[in-house]
Structure formats: C-alpha cells, structure tokens
Image (cartoon, rainbow, N blue to C red):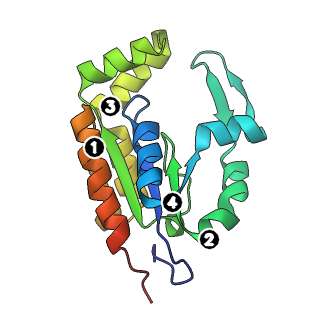
Amino acid sequence: MAQDSKRSRPNILVTGTPGTGKTTTSTALAESTQLRHINIGELVREKNLHDGWDDELECHVINEDLVCDELEDIMEQGGNIVDYHGCDFFPERWFDRVVVLQTENSVLYDRLTKRGYTGAKLTNNIECEIFQVLLEEAKESYPEDIVLALKSDTIEDITRNIAILTDWVRNWQPRS
C-alpha cells in the first residue's frame, strides 16, 4: 500500500530524463504546497552517497542503498517531493504519486546542450526520452494508478503541472 496512515502529508516522486524540468517543477511545487523538496543529486554530492565518478557519463555513481538509508526516516514522516532521474530503486511504499515529466526531443536536446552535455551523456539521455525509459520504469516499479506522465515542454506546461499537482496534494487523504 503506497499511502501510509502514519503520514499526514503525501510523498511525491518527480522523475524524468535530465532536462525535463524536475528541479524547476519540484521547487515550485514545494513552494506552493509547503512540502519538502529533496534533490537526490544534491543529496548524493553533499553526503557522499556515491561510489565514485563515471568519466564517460560525467556523473557520480550513486550508491542506492546509502541513499535509501539516508531517506528512510524522512520518507516515513511524509511531506516530501523527491526529485531524481531514476525511480526503480526507491521503495514502493514511500510514494503516493509518481510524476514522470516528458519533453519533446528537440526541446530536450536544446536544454541539454545548453547545460554542456555532449557525447555519450547527451546521446544516452535523448535516447532515454525517445524510448520512454523512465515512464516504463515507473510503471514497472509502482502501482500504475499512482503514475502520472506530464508534458513539460514550456513554461505554460510547467505552470499547469504545478497547478494539477498542488490540487492533488490539497485533496490527498491517507488511507486507513
């Protein structure tokens, strides 16, 4: 059961390929709902929850067990928005809503190249979006009725997504 009666506020996972607007969406949603925003990439860097650096992909190799151990108590309390480009290693019980942000490939390409992505890092992320890898990962890892795919191409899309999710948070009730 995803919703836990011990929690008075929901937990949301915002996932998607890098560049789809996870952090922008999560930050604005946290402001509008007063939920806590947890950026997993920042947490991994700040607390050294990784197993080193991947030179080819130019990123830390996340230690999933350390991340989950770090978050366990916080997630049990509820009231969290977790922002990360993966989702299959988090316990199912943690989340009441899993949001997969999706971006049109040319928009995503522009966003990633502006961030300095090149080579394998750029290609892997574009292919991940083309093949909807994260949507499939979410559907395989969580009950399908809590997974929500949202378009995230424009500021208008992001604004609409925040409104949709804010309404959902306001109407959320723990299951008994």
Q: Distance between the Cα atoms at labels 3 and 4?
A: 28 Å
Which labelled disc corresponds to residue 35? Answer: 4
Q: CA distance from mark 2 to mark 1?
A: 29 Å
Percent coordinates x, y for residue 120 in the rendering = 48, 15
Q: Residues within 10 Å of mark 1 (few under 14, many from 20)?
A: some
- Coordinates of residue 135 in the picture (x, y in percent): 33, 46
Name the side, left or right, on which 159 lies relative to 5: left
Corner quadrant of residue 18:
top left
Distance between the alpha carbons at the discs numbered 3 and 1: 21 Å
Q: Residue at x 64, y 37 (%)?
A: 42
Question: Within 10 angstroms of label 3, few (less than 14), some, or many (20 or more) residues?
Answer: many
Query: Could you say where residue 10 lies in the image, as x and y percent from the top left?
Result: 47, 69
Q: Give the residue type at disc 2.
A: Glu
Q: Amino acid at mark 3?
A: Glu
* Pointer 4 with pointer 1, Cβ within 8 A: no
Q: Which residue is mark 1?
A: 159
Q: Nearer the viewer, mark 2 or mark 3?
A: 2
Where disc 1 sits, the SS reads helix
- Which of the two labelled residues, at mark 3 and mark 4, occupies the earlier sequence position? 4
Q: Secondary structure at mark 2?
A: helix
Q: Which mark is residue 76?
A: 2
Amino acid type, callout 4:
Leu
Which residue is under mark 3?
129
Q: Of label 4 and label 1, which has the lower sequence position? A: 4
Q: For the N terminus, give its image quadrant.
A: bottom left
